[in-house]
Amino acid sequence: HYIVVDMSADMIKGARASHPAAEFLVASATEFSHLLPEQDQQFDAVVSIMMLSTLPSKQDLISVFRQSYTVLRQGGVLVVCNPHPAFDSYMQHQSGEVLTEFDGYYAEGRRYDVARIIGDTKLGFTDYHWTLEAMIACIVSAGFRLTGIDECKSTGGMLPNPSHIIFIATK
Protein backbone atom coordinates (compact mmCIF):
# COMPACT_ATOMS: atom_id res chain seq x y z
CA HIS A 1 0.00 0.00 0.00
CA TYR A 2 1.38 3.36 -0.95
CA ILE A 3 0.17 6.93 -1.21
CA VAL A 4 1.55 9.46 -3.67
CA VAL A 5 1.55 13.12 -2.59
CA ASP A 6 2.05 15.93 -5.10
CA MET A 7 0.75 19.47 -5.16
CA SER A 8 0.17 19.34 -8.92
CA ALA A 9 -3.19 17.89 -9.95
CA ASP A 10 -1.75 17.38 -13.47
CA MET A 11 1.14 15.29 -12.10
CA ILE A 12 -1.32 13.23 -10.02
CA LYS A 13 -3.51 12.71 -13.09
CA GLY A 14 -0.56 11.39 -15.10
CA ALA A 15 0.66 9.18 -12.25
CA ARG A 16 -2.81 7.76 -11.63
CA ALA A 17 -2.96 6.51 -15.22
CA SER A 18 0.37 4.68 -14.78
CA HIS A 19 -0.20 3.41 -11.23
CA PRO A 20 -3.89 2.54 -10.77
CA ALA A 21 -3.26 0.59 -7.53
CA ALA A 22 -1.86 3.61 -5.69
CA GLU A 23 -3.73 6.17 -3.65
CA PHE A 24 -3.16 9.80 -4.58
CA LEU A 25 -3.32 12.99 -2.59
CA VAL A 26 -3.11 16.48 -4.10
CA ALA A 27 -1.36 18.36 -1.31
CA SER A 28 1.83 20.14 -0.39
CA ALA A 29 4.60 18.01 1.08
CA THR A 30 4.91 20.68 3.78
CA GLU A 31 1.43 19.92 5.15
CA PHE A 32 -0.19 16.63 4.23
CA SER A 33 -0.14 14.34 7.30
CA HIS A 34 -3.41 15.71 8.72
CA LEU A 35 -5.18 14.64 5.52
CA LEU A 36 -4.38 10.96 6.11
CA PRO A 37 -6.51 8.71 8.30
CA GLU A 38 -4.70 7.78 11.52
CA GLN A 39 -4.14 4.18 10.35
CA ASP A 40 -2.27 5.59 7.32
CA GLN A 41 0.26 7.35 9.53
CA GLN A 42 2.38 4.24 10.07
CA PHE A 43 4.36 3.90 6.86
CA ASP A 44 7.56 1.87 6.55
CA ALA A 45 9.15 4.44 4.24
CA VAL A 46 8.81 7.92 2.79
CA VAL A 47 10.58 8.59 -0.51
CA SER A 48 11.20 12.10 -1.81
CA ILE A 49 12.63 12.55 -5.29
CA MET A 50 13.85 15.87 -6.73
CA MET A 51 11.73 17.96 -4.39
CA LEU A 52 13.97 19.80 -1.90
CA SER A 53 15.29 22.24 -4.49
CA THR A 54 11.71 23.40 -5.18
CA LEU A 55 11.29 24.65 -1.61
CA PRO A 56 11.86 28.40 -1.09
CA SER A 57 12.66 28.42 2.64
CA LYS A 58 14.53 26.44 5.25
CA GLN A 59 11.28 26.29 7.24
CA ASP A 60 9.67 24.53 4.25
CA LEU A 61 12.47 21.93 4.28
CA ILE A 62 11.94 21.34 8.00
CA SER A 63 8.15 21.09 7.48
CA VAL A 64 8.59 18.42 4.80
CA PHE A 65 10.80 16.37 7.10
CA ARG A 66 8.44 16.82 10.08
CA GLN A 67 5.49 15.70 7.95
CA SER A 68 7.49 12.66 6.87
CA TYR A 69 8.44 11.92 10.47
CA THR A 70 4.75 12.09 11.48
CA VAL A 71 3.59 9.48 8.96
CA LEU A 72 6.42 6.99 9.58
CA ARG A 73 6.22 4.17 12.08
CA GLN A 74 9.01 3.92 14.65
CA GLY A 75 12.05 2.60 12.79
CA GLY A 76 10.64 3.81 9.45
CA VAL A 77 13.02 5.11 6.80
CA LEU A 78 13.20 8.41 4.95
CA VAL A 79 14.93 8.32 1.54
CA VAL A 80 15.60 11.67 -0.15
CA CYS A 81 17.13 12.00 -3.62
CA ASN A 82 18.01 15.47 -4.77
CA PRO A 83 20.50 17.19 -7.07
CA HIS A 84 23.88 17.23 -5.34
CA PRO A 85 24.20 20.67 -3.73
CA ALA A 86 27.86 21.07 -4.71
CA PHE A 87 27.58 19.79 -8.27
CA ASP A 88 24.08 20.58 -9.52
CA SER A 89 24.04 21.01 -13.29
CA TYR A 90 23.24 24.71 -13.12
CA MET A 91 26.47 25.20 -11.16
CA GLN A 92 28.60 23.35 -13.67
CA HIS A 93 27.52 25.23 -16.84
CA GLN A 94 28.40 22.21 -18.97
CA SER A 95 28.53 22.79 -22.73
CA GLY A 96 26.22 25.81 -22.63
CA GLU A 97 23.13 23.64 -22.14
CA VAL A 98 22.26 25.22 -18.76
CA LEU A 99 21.82 28.96 -18.35
CA THR A 100 21.58 30.71 -14.97
CA GLU A 101 23.32 33.25 -12.74
CA PHE A 102 24.85 31.05 -10.05
CA ASP A 103 26.19 33.09 -7.08
CA GLY A 104 28.21 30.39 -5.36
CA TYR A 105 27.73 27.37 -3.18
CA TYR A 106 27.12 29.29 0.05
CA ALA A 107 24.30 31.45 -1.36
CA GLU A 108 21.87 29.34 0.68
CA GLY A 109 18.19 29.58 -0.18
CA ARG A 110 18.95 31.64 -3.28
CA ARG A 111 16.33 31.38 -6.03
CA TYR A 112 17.63 30.50 -9.48
CA ASP A 113 15.62 30.73 -12.65
CA VAL A 114 17.23 28.11 -14.81
CA ALA A 115 16.95 27.48 -18.54
CA ARG A 116 18.06 24.15 -19.96
CA ILE A 117 18.45 23.77 -23.69
CA ILE A 118 17.84 20.31 -25.12
CA GLY A 119 18.14 20.28 -28.88
CA ASP A 120 15.96 23.14 -30.11
CA THR A 121 13.86 23.21 -26.94
CA LYS A 122 14.44 25.61 -24.06
CA LEU A 123 12.99 24.42 -20.73
CA GLY A 124 12.66 26.76 -17.77
CA PHE A 125 12.32 26.02 -14.08
CA THR A 126 12.93 27.59 -10.69
CA ASP A 127 15.36 26.05 -8.25
CA TYR A 128 16.40 26.99 -4.71
CA HIS A 129 19.92 26.20 -3.62
CA TRP A 130 20.48 24.47 -0.26
CA THR A 131 23.90 23.51 1.04
CA LEU A 132 24.69 20.00 2.21
CA GLU A 133 24.94 21.33 5.76
CA ALA A 134 21.47 22.95 5.56
CA MET A 135 19.81 19.80 4.22
CA ILE A 136 21.37 17.59 6.90
CA ALA A 137 20.51 20.07 9.67
CA CYS A 138 16.87 20.15 8.55
CA ILE A 139 16.62 16.34 8.45
CA VAL A 140 18.11 16.02 11.94
CA SER A 141 16.04 18.89 13.40
CA ALA A 142 12.88 17.03 12.39
CA GLY A 143 13.91 14.15 14.67
CA PHE A 144 15.55 11.79 12.19
CA ARG A 145 18.83 9.97 12.65
CA LEU A 146 20.90 10.24 9.47
CA THR A 147 22.06 6.71 8.64
CA GLY A 148 23.50 7.09 5.14
CA ILE A 149 24.55 9.39 2.34
CA ASP A 150 25.19 8.24 -1.24
CA GLU A 151 26.74 10.75 -3.64
CA CYS A 152 25.69 8.73 -6.70
CA LYS A 153 28.94 8.17 -8.53
CA SER A 154 28.51 8.40 -12.27
CA THR A 155 28.36 5.07 -14.07
CA GLY A 156 31.01 4.66 -16.71
CA GLY A 157 32.72 7.88 -15.65
CA MET A 158 30.39 9.98 -17.80
CA LEU A 159 30.37 12.85 -15.28
CA PRO A 160 33.42 14.02 -13.31
CA ASN A 161 31.27 14.93 -10.28
CA PRO A 162 28.16 13.44 -8.69
CA SER A 163 24.92 14.86 -10.08
CA HIS A 164 22.69 13.66 -7.23
CA ILE A 165 22.81 12.83 -3.55
CA ILE A 166 20.69 10.40 -1.56
CA PHE A 167 20.07 10.80 2.17
CA ILE A 168 18.84 7.87 4.24
CA ALA A 169 17.44 8.63 7.69
CA THR A 170 15.58 6.63 10.31
CA LYS A 171 12.81 7.58 12.73
Image (cartoon, rainbow, N blue to C red):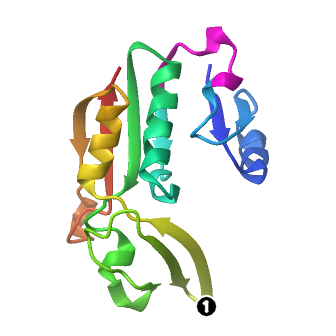
36, 57: nearer the viewer: 57
- Where residue 121 sits: x, y (%)? 62, 85
Residue for point 31% across, 30% down: 169
Residue for point 55% across, 70% down: 126
134 on left or right of 126? left
Residue for point 44% across, 84% down: 100
34 on left or right of 136? right
- Where residue 134 sits: x, y (%)? 29, 51
Q: Secondary structure at mark 1?
A: loop
Q: Which residues are magenta?
A: 34-45
Quarter residue 97 falls in: bottom left
Task: Judge whether residue 131 can be spotted in this image.
Answer: yes
Residue for point 39% across, 35% down: 79
Identify the residue under disc 1. 120
Mark 1 is on which residue type? Asp
Judge whether residue 159 is colored magenta: no
Judge whether residue 39 is colored magenta: yes
64, 151: nearer the viewer: 64
110 on left or right of 27? left
Q: Is residue 118 above or below residue 76?
A: below
